[in-house]
Image (tube, coloured by chain):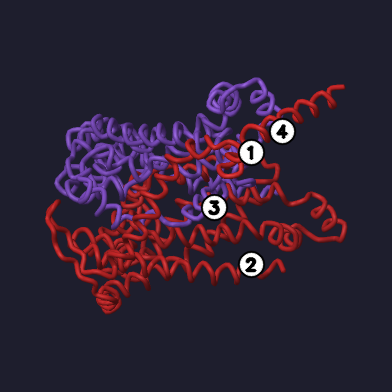
Amino acid sequence: MKLKFVALLVGAFVFLFPFYYMLIGSLQAEPDPSVSGAIPAGNLTLHNYSEINSAISLGRSLVNSGIFTGGVILGTLVFGVLAGYALARLQFRGRGVVFNLMLLFQVVPFQLLTIPLYVLIVRSYGLADSYLGMILPFAINSTAVLVFRQYFLQLPVELFDAARIDGASELNILWRIAVPLVRPALLTGVLLTFIGPWNEFLWPFLITKQQDLQPLAVSLSNYLTTVSARAANPFGAVLAGACVLAAPAVALFLIFQRRFISSSLESGVKG
Amino acid sequence: MTVTGRASILGTRGRRLSVGGAAVGRILGQQPIGTALVTPYVVFLAAVFAYPLAFAVYMSFHDYFFAAPGAIVERPFVGFDNYVTVLSDPAVRRSFANVGIFLLINVPLTVVLSLVLAASLNAAIRWRTFIRVSYYVPYVTASVAVVGVWLFLFNSNGLVNSVLGPLAPDPSWLVNSKLAMPTVAIYVTWKQLGFFILLYLAALQNVSKDLYEAAAMDGADKWKSFWNVTVPGVQPATTLVVLVATITGANLFTEPYLLTGGGGPDGASASPVLIMYQRGIEQGNPDIGSAIGVLLVIGVLLLALIERRFVGREDR
């Protein structure tokens, strides 16, 4: 029992150490890869943050990441809730087909669609270097639709029958009765959806060539592969950028970790 | 009283429906508005999944190239030419072999580690929340961010090598053609493990406590009850973990692109998606890129079928 606890603790250390090292490295004036460098004694500075900020404009990149992520969350909340509700609660022709298609497309990996999507969105629709082009392939998160559907299914059927007898329209029922009752699902949907576009690299990397439209993940990786060789402390600047990119996702996860874990569990078991 | 009341209400409702909308109901369903609500999502699925999928197959059989918008160009049907080009390209063959090595390391390691960790974390232990959260953090963090630290850690004169001292490999991890792909595989396993622990933790909630009690009564020790109760109990989850890990692994791109500087050294860690990007977009041959993509999908589907038979058999 004790041994297991120690082993788990050592494992947790292995998982957390790179994050600690990321923070320390971003604060060191000189890169110090020696063992003693992992325990810093003084000489900490914010210089690396201003270095990366002057190279890739952190603020602008964060705004771009925010717009990209926000657009996806908005699309998922609006259209995903409508679809989830219809799939859970309404009898209409083709419901089974839509649900099965949705499950089928879950197994189609996004990377395999990148070439045709690139040809269509960049070449045919001319949406290169635009937020719309960035958001479009992710606009509705199917996992979130599954979560919404699952929560709508759990509401008692009497509620809907009663409202229908009272003459409420289906949209009224959705907006006044169903949505307020599934607020936790909405939060889960937002959290689930957030980490996708915030951390996404390949797609925005392909379609944004203009630096002032690139999300942070893209501008940071461009810095990593091209510019960093010329910087005085390349690792320090990269790690500073990495901290800025990691912080919002990690913070959201820590704040909502209880909900994140338990609700993912539920949808995982049933979905 | 209430029961009869409700029954009569439902009765009237049923009758009203049958009078008013029987014909409409039979064709469109009871609530045809559902079609309207689900339409944006269906359009999205069609535009982002179905059409591109068909378009990729179309491109792979044609001499497809980028042209100025609006220009009318001929893109003749070329049969399997693109596939022949792809299959005779040593870089492509190498990338498929590389991803095979990747999966051989990543998938078994992921299954074993996430199951063992989930089983340990499911028990009552001290600091459980803290330990659980630590394992999830890499999963929620952007790969681009974490790659920065790994580059620093696994650099020739990085922390890992200074701890190892004379045991450090030469050339170092990410620039060593034998170690580059395994290092990428370890990195991805570490990064994704939290998600798979989560899947197993969910599955463990469905394993009946009675089975453990029965096993204990039969004198099974911890190890035996893990092997004979837990492992068969989470069988469906194991199938899911194997399939998801395979699909994610086959789509490897960010890590070889950033961690080993574009699939280096000398193509030793190039993945099919990386080659697909280089051929299809960098070099402007979307037909070749699509052919690589189609071959990759077929490969993944075949692998998934084999894995399903192999992993799914144990519980029968």
- Cα–Cα span, label 1 and label 4: 10 Å
Using the image, tell me which numbered label, if any, was put on residue B312.
Answer: 2
Q: Chain coloured purple: which letter?
A: A
Q: Is residue A104 left or right of residue B77?
A: right
The mark found on residue B22 in the picture is 1
**Residue B304 at x, y percent in the picture:** 51, 67
Foreground disc of the pair 1, 4: 1
Q: How crowded is mark 3: few (under 14 residues within 10 Å), some or many (20 or more)?
A: few
Q: What element carries label 4?
A: helix
**What's the CA distance linking mark 2 and mark 1?**
46 Å
Would you say residue A36 is visible in this rendering?
no
Q: What amino acid is labelled 1 in the image? A: Ala
Instruction: Tell me whether marks 1 and 4 sit on the same chain.
Output: yes
Type of the residue with mark 2? Gly
**Disc number for residue A100:** 3
Residue B81 picture location, percent across and down: 25, 77
Query: Of circles 3 and 1, which is in front?
Result: 1
Decide: is A68 above or below B164.
above
In the image, B93 versus A173, the foreground residue is A173
Vertical position of residue A184 compared to residue A199: above or below:
above
Who's the residue at 55% across and 23% down the image? Answer: A172
Query: In the image, which is nearer the foreground, mark 3 or mark 4?
Result: 4
Residue A234 quadrant: top left
- Could you tell me which chain the residue with mark 1 belongs to? B
The label number, if any, that marks residue B14 in the structure image:
4
User: Mark 4, chain letter?
Assistant: B
